[in-house]
Amino acid sequence: MVGLVAKVKVKEGRMEEALGLFRDLLKDVRNEPGTLNYTINRDPAEPNVIYVLERYQDDAALKAHMSTPHFGAFFARMGGLLDGNPEMRVLEEVAAK
């Protein structure tokens, strides 16, 4: 299993728009083979930050997700809402419930 954690900083006043784009993305992500879990999260202490927690069957599923047309379109639309580059960490799962 492969995990990914992304920290996405959103420009002031653009959070609802960004969350809407993420919700639209989820409609397509749900149908991706090998994508096991994909959640959009907020930390009340960081009101302009979105954390995306992702879990994939393997590296191939992660690469497939990143190369889908819907992900490319999402990222293009998100570009104007970002406050800097997203921070991403790909993780190797060593234990899970």
Image: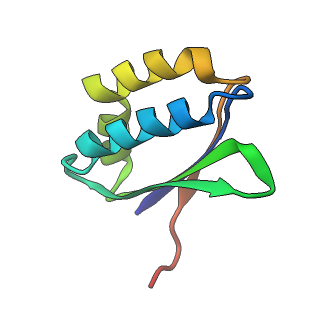
Residue farthest toward the bottom in the current orientation of the protein: 97
Report x, y in % for residue 86. 65, 32
- Where residue 21 sits: x, y (%)? 43, 32
Horizontal relation, residue 92 to residue 65: left or right:
right
Q: Nearer the viewer, residue 45 or 73?
A: 45
Image quadrant where one finds the N terminus: bottom left
Residue at image position (26%, 23%) is 69
- The residue positioned 74% from the left and 46% from the top of the image is 47
Judge by depth and name the residue closer to the eye, 59 or 52.
52
Left or right side of 79 for 72: left
Q: Percent from the top left, x then y, of residue 8?
A: 64, 37
Which residue is pictured at 70% across the width and 43% down the height?
49
Tell me if residue 37 comes above or below residue 85 in the rendering. below
User: Taking the image as drawn, is residue 68 in sight?
Assistant: no
The answer to whether 83 is drawn above or below residue 16 in the figure is above
- Which quadrant holds the C terminus? bottom left
Q: Compared with residue 27, is residue 34 higher up or lower down, i.e. above or below? A: below
Left or right, 10 with reference to 74: right
Asked whether the viewer can see residue 19, the reply is: yes
Residue at figure coordinates x 51%, y 79% from the top left: 95
Picture quarter containing residue 24? Answer: top left
Q: Is residue 28 left or right of residue 67?
A: left
Q: Nearer the viewer, residue 74 or 57?
A: 74
Q: Nearer the viewer, residue 39 or 15?
A: 15
Q: Residue 74, image x and y in percent?
A: 40, 25
Number of disc labels: 0
Outermost residue on the right side: it is 45
Colouring used for the render: rainbow
